[in-house]
């Protein structure tokens, strides 16, 4: 299915989601919101809830005050360590107009090759580590 698309817009709901790794390892060029954009809108998202729960201000992981507090106090350093902001060859956008511009100027073929090469290196590193585990 992915072969019919030249890139993917990925707006993750958490620091590390499986779809990020699936798309990245497949060499699908990714357009993702940059860190400053994520920090602007994340406190307003009701994560981990159904629509009805969100409207009622309920849900298992819904506590916008804690996210707003983390953003307000600069305690967002964990995002700097997430693979979505550490892996190379990802195209980040900071606004809707920036997204449109970058989507039209994206060099998908070369990005795809570099993403696949990076994935192969990471796989080899992981295999060396886990082969040593007894």
Image: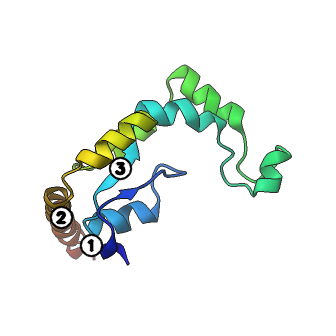
Q: Residue furthest top?
A: 73
Residue wearing tag 1: 133
Depicted 78 relative to depicted 75: above or below: below
Residues packed near mark 2 inside 10 Å, few (<14), some (14 to 19) or many (20 plus): few
Element type at mark 3: strand
Percent across and percent down for residue 13 are: 55, 51
- In depth, the one of 55 and 8 nearer the eye is 8
Residue wearing tag 2: 125
Percent across and percent down for residue 67 are: 62, 34
Element type at mark 1: loop
Mark 1–mark 2 distance (CA, rounded to whole Å): 13 Å
- In depth, the one of 42 and 4 nearer the eye is 4
- Residue at 28% across / 70% down in the picture? 26
Of marks 1 and 2, the one in the foreground: 2
Examine the rendering and report whether any part of residue 77 can be seen: no
- Residue at 49% across / 23% down in the picture? 74
Mark 2–mark 3 distance (CA, rounded to whole Å): 26 Å
**Horizontal arrangement in the rendering, residue 79 relative to residue 2 (left or right):** right
Q: Quadrant of residue 111?
A: bottom left
Q: Quadrant of residue 127?
A: bottom left
Depicted 134 relative to depicted 60: above or below: below
């Amino acid at each position: 299915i992915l072969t019919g698309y030249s890139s993917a817009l990925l707006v993750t709901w958490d620091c590390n989601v499986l779809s990020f790794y699936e798309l990245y390892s497949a060499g699908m060029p990714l357009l993702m919101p940059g860190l400053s954009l994520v920090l602007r809108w994340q406190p307003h998202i009701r994560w981990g809830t159904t629509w009805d729960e969100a409207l009622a201000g309920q849900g298992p992981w819904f506590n916008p005050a804690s996210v707003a507090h983390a953003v307000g106090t600069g305690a967002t350093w964990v995002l700097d360590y997430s693979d979505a902001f550490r892996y190379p060859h990802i195209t980040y956008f900071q606004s809707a107009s920036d997204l449109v511009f970058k989507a039209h100027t994206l060099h998908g073929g070369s990005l795809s090759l570099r993403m696949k090469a990076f994935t192969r290196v990471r796989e080899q590193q992981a295999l060396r580590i886990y082969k040593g585990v007894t």
